[in-house]
Each structure stands twice: as C-alpha cells, then as structure tokens.
Image: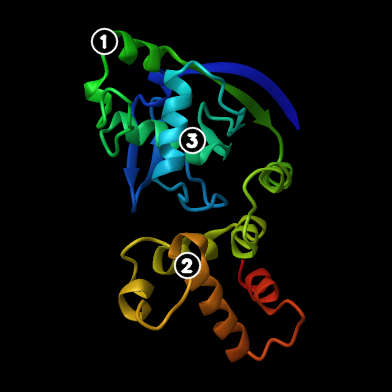
C-alpha cells in the first residue's frame, strides 16, 4: 500500500457534508465516503465529541486520519470516522461544548475569530492507495491499535459486501426494523452490532452450521 501525507482544512472537510441513513455519509465536497460498508457505526458519546471540538479550538493536534484513494477522484474513510462526524455535526449545530464563561457553546455562538480558527484548522490525513484486501487489512490494524473493534464490527469489515450492507439496514441503524420489533427482548446496543450478531447466530443455527465460529462461516458463505 502506498501512503501519502496531506493536510486537509476543516472548511474543506465539511463542504458538501450529508448524513443520510439511506444514501450514506459524505464530506469533502461530496468526494469522501465517511462510512463505507466496512466501517463501524457512530459510537462516540457526547463527552468524546466535545473533546474533539475542544482539541481543535485549543489548537492541539488530533490523531492522524486515513483515507483510501478510490481512483475516480473520490475517497473512503479508513480511520477517523468518529472524529470526522464529530466535527461535521458540531458545525451543523447538532451539539454544544461547554466553556467556563459560556456554558452552552454551539458553532454559531463562537466569535468570528474562533470560527475562522475552527474552519482553518488542518487535519493530518494519510491518503492510502492499494487493493481492497490491503485496505481491509489496514483497517483492522489501525482499529486494533485504537478503540477496540468489537467482534461483529470486525466481521463486518472482513466479510464486507452486499450482504453486510443490506443486513446493517435492518439490524444496525437507529429506528431499524429489528429495533422496532425486538428492542423489548434484546440486550446490547444497535450501533455495537449486538442485534446483527444475535440474528446471525440464529441464522447459522437454523442452517445447521456446525463450526467453532458459526457466525464467521455463515457470513463467509453469504458474502
């Protein structure tokens, strides 16, 4: 895999930002797929999102992000989704931070100087060019080093394809069919793939899959 280091201003990252449950999550003038099929769901809580914004406003460095070069002028997020969505959603007025003198501080409440600092802040991004296998292998490595990938999140990355993409529509999204039908009876969190993992265990059992890792085998068969 070839890796090239670049700096991306937040004003460019948030340009063309859309977050649509059906049509995907995009930024960087609509060229960056922030949540490609192998990515996990958004998991940052409010304090984590606020920490990202406070880091930026203080001028401290954020960790390096990794984008995959698709080849047609577009990109996919390999690592950095949680920070990217925190940045974009703060700009969209989705949450506020807390300042000692200003207890509720949305982007629109920042001073003009603070807004310019936020928009001019440069993110460190590695642009990665390689095969699909290399991208998935890299995704696994950098996520093992960061916030731990849960077992089902890792399976979603390894067995990425139309099956996983469609299954996540019904078992991983807020307000999805599985939540509406089974939330009273299920444990675990949608965004952590608990519903999807449980359903796949049931499906593997139904199909009589006898294996030490039945969910992996089921996903491999249906990828």
Residue to which mark 3 is pinned: 83
- The secondary structure type at the circle numbered 2 is helix
Label 3 to label 2: alpha-carbon separation: 25 Å
Q: Is residue 75 left or right of residue 10?
A: right
Residue to which mark 1 is pinned: 112
Residue 155 versus residue 110: which sits nearer the camera? 110
Label 2 to label 1: alpha-carbon separation: 44 Å
Mark 2 or mark 1: whose residue is earlier in sequence: 1
Q: Position of residue 81 (x, y in %)?
A: 50, 40
* Residue farthest to the top, as pictured: 113
- The secondary structure type at the circle numbered 3 is helix
- The answer to whether marks 2 and 1 mark residues whose Cβ atoms lie closer than 8 Å is no
Picture layout, residue 8 above or below residue 161? above
In the rendered image, the quadrant that contains the C terminus is: bottom right
Residue 31 in view here: no
Please rate how many residues cluster around mark 2, counting C-alpha atoms within 10 Å: few if below 14, some from 14 to 19, many from 20. some
| Nearer mark to the viewer, of 2 and 1 | 1
* Residue farthest to the front, as pictured: 100
Residue to which mark 2 is pinned: 167
Q: Position of residue 195 (x, y in %)?
A: 48, 72
Please give the name of the residue rendered at 56% of the width and 21% of the height, measured from the top-left corner. 61
Please give the name of the residue rendered at 31% of the width and 28% of the height, measured from the top-left corner. 91
In terms of image quadrants, where is residue 105? Answer: top left
- The answer to whether marks 3 and 2 mark residues whose Cβ atoms lie closer than 8 Å is no
Residue 12 in view here: yes
Mark 3 or mark 1: whose residue is earlier in sequence: 3
Mark 3 or mark 2: whose residue is earlier in sequence: 3
In terms of image quadrants, where is residue 186? Answer: bottom left
In the rendered image, the quadrant that contains the N terminus is: top right
């Amino acid at each position: 895999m070839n890796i090239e280091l670049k700096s991306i201003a937040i004003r460019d990252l948030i340009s063309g930002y859309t977050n649509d449950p059906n049509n995907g999550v995009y930024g960087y003038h609509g060229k960056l797929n922030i949540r490609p099929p192998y990515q996990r769901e958004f998991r940052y809580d409010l304090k984590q999102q606020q920490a990202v914004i406070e880091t930026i406003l203080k001028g401290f460095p954020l960790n390096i992000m990794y984008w995959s070069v698709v080849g047609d002028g577009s990109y996919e997020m390999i690592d950095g989704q949680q920070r990217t969505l925190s940045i974009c959603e703060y700009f969209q007025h989705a949450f506020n931070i807390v300042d000692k003198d200003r207890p509720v501080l949305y982007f629109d409440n920042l001073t003009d100087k603070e807004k310019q600092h936020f928009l001019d802040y440069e993110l460190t991004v590695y642009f990665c060019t390689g095969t699909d296998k290399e991208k998935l292998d890299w995704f696994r490595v950098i996520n093992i080093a960061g916030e731990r990938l849960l077992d089902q999140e890792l399976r979603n990355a390894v067995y990425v394809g139309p099956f996983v993409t469609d299954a996540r529509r019904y078992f991983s999204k807020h307000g999805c069919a599985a939540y509406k039908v089974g939330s009273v009876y299920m444990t675990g969190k949608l965004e952590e793939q608990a519903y999807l993992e449980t359903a796949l265990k049931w499906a593997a059992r139904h199909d009589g899959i006898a294996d030490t890792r039945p969910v992996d085998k089921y996903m491999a068969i249906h990828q």
